[in-house]
Image (cartoon, rainbow, N blue to C red):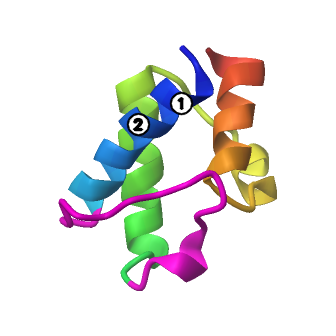
């Protein structure tokens, strides 16, 4: 998968988790950009991404991520 394909799939997951069909994300999107992105939705988001891509993140990996682009880079580098 390309970065763009992964981003498109993750955007659909964001829309589902945050229940907002108009939500758009970019590589720079982070928790500060989405008002509803709290700790509960963060867990739901990670779980949904892991399920959709059939991957598992280590807690240490997640703590180092600053935005969606970092997550995609990690997915490409180590998971996909």
State the quadrant of the C terminus: top right
Question: Which residue occupies 44% across, 23% down?
Answer: 53
Q: Quadrant of residue 72?
A: top right
Q: Tell me where the magenta segment starts and ends, as one range.
A: 18-35
Secondary structure of the residue carrying numbered label 2: helix
User: Which residue is drawn at the image coordinates 45% and 77% (left, top)?
Assistant: 34
The crowding category of the residue bearing disc 2, from other C-alpha atoms within 10 Å (few below 14, some 14 to 19, many at least 20), is some
Q: Which residue is mark 2?
A: 8
In the rendered image, residue 16, in percent from the top left (x then y), is placed at: 22, 53
Asked if disc 1 and disc 2 are in contact, CB closer than 8 Å, the reply is: yes
Left or right: 48 as drawn, with respect to 53: left
**Residue 29 x %, y %:** 58, 64
Q: Nearer the viewer, residue 61 or 17?
A: 17
Tell me, for residue 4, which label it has, or none.
1
Q: Position of residue 21 (x, y in %)?
A: 18, 60
At x 73%, y 33%, the residue is 74
Is the magenta region chiefly helix, strand or loop?
Answer: loop
């Amino acid at each position: 998968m390309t970065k763009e394909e992964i981003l498109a799939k993750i955007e659909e997951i964001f829309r589902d988790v945050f229940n907002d069909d108009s939500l758009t994300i970019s590589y720079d999107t982070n928790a500060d950009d989405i008002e509803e992105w709290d700790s509960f939705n963060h867990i739901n988001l990670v779980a949904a991404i892991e399920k959709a891509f059939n991957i598992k993140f280590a807690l240490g990996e997640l703590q180092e991520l600053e935005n969606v682009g970092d997550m995609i880079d990690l997915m490409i580098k180590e998971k996909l």
